[in-house]
Image (cartoon, rainbow, N blue to C red):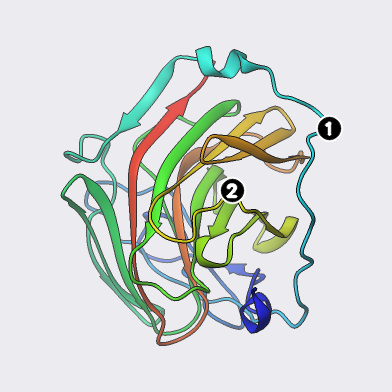
Amino acid sequence: MRSDTLKKRWFPILAVAAGLFLSSLACSSIPFLAPTPTPTATSTPTPTETPTPTETPTITPTFTPSLTPTQSYLDWPVVLTDSFDDNINNWFVGPSNDTFADSSVSITDGQYLVDITALQGVFWALTPTVKNLNNFYITVEVENKTGPASSNYGLVCRQSSGNKYFFAIAAEDQFYGFLVLNNSQWTTILDWTSSSQINTSGLNQVGMLAKGTSFSFFINGELVDQTEDSILKSGKVGVAVELAKAGDTAQIAFDNFQVQAP
């Protein structure tokens, strides 16, 4: 299913201080548009690099929850909702061109569109204006419109001082994973895992529930995995895109971003 593309997943990264902030940037031996602080309406993001993995990720069997999350989080107040009919939540929009990528972000036809051409492996996180959160339930609809199957995209959370969690999917190959960037080092928490719940084309809704050290992950409304991690306590939430290598070009569309918190 994944063959060689599996070997290109999860790139450790060294955090990079860039003069442009949109969310977070990171870099290392091979590109990956890196993470950094939160954007302002006029700020410009900067991509960064990431190293190529040598091992092939483990393909995990279908997940069976050991713990069913209570539904109380669905009753949490909505603190932010965005259908991208305008830019009321101050997402980054505009061009960004540097040694890592040539990119442009726009709000077009009710979607948040990230157009990016990698000049090396690149990871890019983008956040709206929202308070720091510890416990939350976030969802977004995402579609890989033109990018290669090796593209990753999804949600970031607890982003602060360049640190963050990243819940990603690679829809064409039906994989998801979860990792953390802390003190300039990426650590895989959930390795790439296969899930038939992921649509191979069109929109996928991805969701993440965080309650203290517990994380639950949802794809198209279904619980697919859970884990525990205590590294990051609180921070911003947003979306992210990653391209594996120079020459990769993608348009990733996000829509209906929503945040609930107690």
Q: Are marks 1 and 2 in contact (CB under 8 Å)?
A: no
Please state the horizontal and vertical placement of residue 18, each as a whole percent of the image.
42, 66
Locate residue 144 relative to residue 243 in the image: left or right: left
Please state the horizontal and vertical placement of residue 89, each as a whole percent of the image.
27, 36
Q: Nearer the viewer, mark 1 or mark 2?
A: 2
Quadrant in the rendering for residue 60: bottom right
Q: Residue 111 bears which disc, if any?
A: none
Q: Residue furthest right?
A: 66
Locate residue 9 relative to residue 16 in the image: left or right: right
Give the class, few, some or many, for how many residues have Cα within 10 Å of label 1's Cα (few <14, many ≥20): few
Q: Amino acid at mark 1?
A: Ser
Q: Residue at x 48, y 40 (%)?
A: 237
Q: Residue at x 62, y 69 (%)?
A: 14
Of 215 and 57, which appears nearest the observer?
57
Q: Is residue 135 visible?
A: yes
Of 88 and 137, which appears nearest the observer?
137
Query: Looking at the picture, does residue 140 appear above or below residue 104?
Result: above
Q: Residue at x 70, y 79 (%)?
A: 53
Query: Looking at the picture, does residue 173 appear above or below residue 256?
Result: below
Quadrant in the rendering for residue 125: bottom left
Mark pair 1, 2: CA separation: 18 Å
Locate residue 247 relative to residue 193 in the image: left or right: left
Label 2: which residue? Answer: 197
Query: Looking at the picture, does residue 61 appear above or below residue 236?
Result: below
Query: SS for tag 1?
Result: loop
Q: Amino acid at mark 2?
A: Gln
Q: Is residue 164 visible?
A: no
Q: Residue 66 bears which disc, if any?
A: 1
Disc on the earlier residue, 1 or 2: 1
